[in-house]
Image (tube, grey):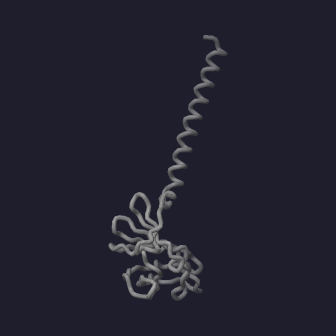
Amino acid sequence: MKKKEKKGILILIVVAVIIIIALVVMRYVKNNNNEGQQPSGDATVQTDGERYTAVYSDGSKMNTSSKLQETKTYGDFTISDIQLTTKDGISTIIANVKNNGNQTTEETDITMTFVDEAGNTIATVPGFIQPMNQGATSQLNASITQDISNAYDFRIE
């Protein structure tokens, strides 16, 4: 083989390796971007007694009540970006919590009381807000082994 042919083959191998690496990276990024997202748009909104629930093809449910999703306050905390989902009979509440006070907070025990439109209690869910510096934001994450996906609202006590 001539020197030019060897160099050409080496260049082709290097280009092939770069393309393979790029494809692997693109696939990895695509898969990681899909983690933590709600199931795709194949939901149907229930109207048969579950007014505030979207049900997805995998059986998971998401609460759609705008009242439940409203930003709430508890002491110096602001609770926002509230999501209530249910999968396999386990309901999970996720929200962002911001410390609006002028000092670091201790761990704070809370009770979330979920209600229907008439204000009747559906369930109470214990939780806690972790210690936070002034102005810091963290995530509230609590679960209950009960389907409360059709709740209208909740209050924090």
Residue 25 picture quarter: top right
Tell me which residue sits at (35%, 69%) in the image.
90
Relative vertical location of residue 22 with respect to residue 8 in this rendering, above or below: below
Quarter of the image where the C terminus is located: bottom left
Asked whether the viewer can see residue 109, the reply is: no
**Left or right: residue 90 compared with residue 99:** left
**Left or right: residue 121 compared with residue 78:** left
Residue 154 x/y as whole percent: 46, 83
Tell me which residue sits at (38%, 73%) in the image.
143
The single residue placed furthest to the top in the displayed view is 1
Residue 91 x/y as whole percent: 39, 71
Quarter of the image where the N terminus is located: top right
The single residue placed furthest to the front in the displayed view is 48
Asked whether the viewer can see residue 135, the reply is: yes
Residue 66 picture quarter: bottom right
- Between 4 and 74, the one lying in front of the other is 74
**Left or right: residue 137 compared with residue 49:** right
Tell me which residue sits at (44%, 88%) in the image.
119
